[in-house]
């Protein structure tokens, strides 16, 4: 004898919602990435600067991750600024996933945030910057001198006083430190 089972929606397994497909924009140099990120953020787009996947890495690179469905609008917006990505790559598998730029190390009294090759360390209680290290750009000693001894809130924006990939990475590290302190 066959039994007819009544459908019970509460017992059905729900599959997780499909994640929006992401893509990455690959540019010729870091200054183009910085300009593109600024323009895309100004337009209200949801983007992240990441390290490139190993398959497309060509050196000291950064890429911009964005919602792939917005590719046409993103390209038009960037072309208005004279920015043309070398590649737009869909993130279709784990090997093409961009690399998170941030690594965090807790030393008890201090927290170190690494963004790309730049590290910023601050005292958790006072929020005082105690060390800046890493990178190989000529402005790193100057950036370190300007930030060390200041609180996260008092520190100048490295992107405003630096002009290299290291300055940009240090800006990201500072922003991540501030974000972690506001949690």
Image: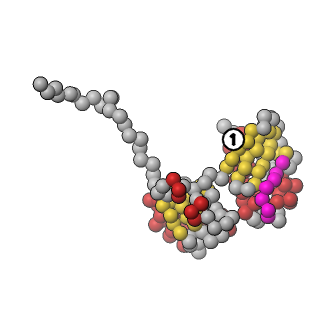
Please indicate, yes or no, whether residue 178 appears anywhere in the rendered image.
no
Q: Residues within 10 Å of mark 1 (few under 14, many from 20)?
A: few
Give the x, y percent position of residue 61.
65, 64
Q: How is the image coloured?
A: secondary structure
**Residue 131 visible here:** yes
Q: Measuring from the top left, give residue 146's x and y in whole percent.
A: 85, 55
Q: Specify the quadrant that holds the C terminus.
A: top right
Is residue 20 part of the magenta span, yes or no? no
Q: Nearer the viewer, residue 1 or 72?
A: 1
* Residue placed most toward the observer, 25 or 136: 136
Q: Which residues are magenta?
A: 131-137
Quadrant where the image shows the N terminus:
top left
Task: Name which residue lies at 44% across and 59% down.
Answer: 69
* Tag 1 secondary structure: helix
Above/below status of 47 relative to 122: below
Q: Residue 145 appears at what percent x and percent y? A: 87, 55
Which residue is denoted by mark 1 in the rendering?
A: 180
């Amino acid at each position: 004898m066959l039994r007819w089972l009544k459908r019970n929606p509460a017992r059905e397994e729900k599959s997780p919602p499909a994640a929006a497909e992401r893509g990455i924009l690959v540019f010729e140099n870091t200054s183009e990435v910085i300009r593109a990120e600024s323009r895309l953020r100004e337009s209200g787009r949801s983007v992240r600067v990441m390290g490139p996947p190993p398959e497309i890495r060509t050196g000291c690179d950064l890429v911009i991750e964005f919602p792939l469905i917005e590719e046409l609008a993103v390209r038009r917006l960037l072309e208005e600024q004279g920015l043309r990505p070398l590649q737009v790559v869909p993130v279709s598998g784990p090997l093409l996933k961009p690399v998170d730029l941030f690594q965090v190390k807790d030393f008890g009294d201090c927290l170190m945030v690494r963004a790309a090759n730049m590290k910023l360390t601050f005292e958790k209680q006072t929020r005082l910057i105690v060390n800046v290290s890493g990178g190989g750009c000529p402005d790193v000693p100057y950036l370190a001198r300007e930030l060390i001894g200041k609180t996260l809130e008092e520190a100048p924006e490295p992107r405003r006083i630096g002009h290299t990939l290291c300055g940009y990475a240090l800006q990201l590290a500072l922003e991540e430190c501030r974000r972690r302190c506001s949690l």
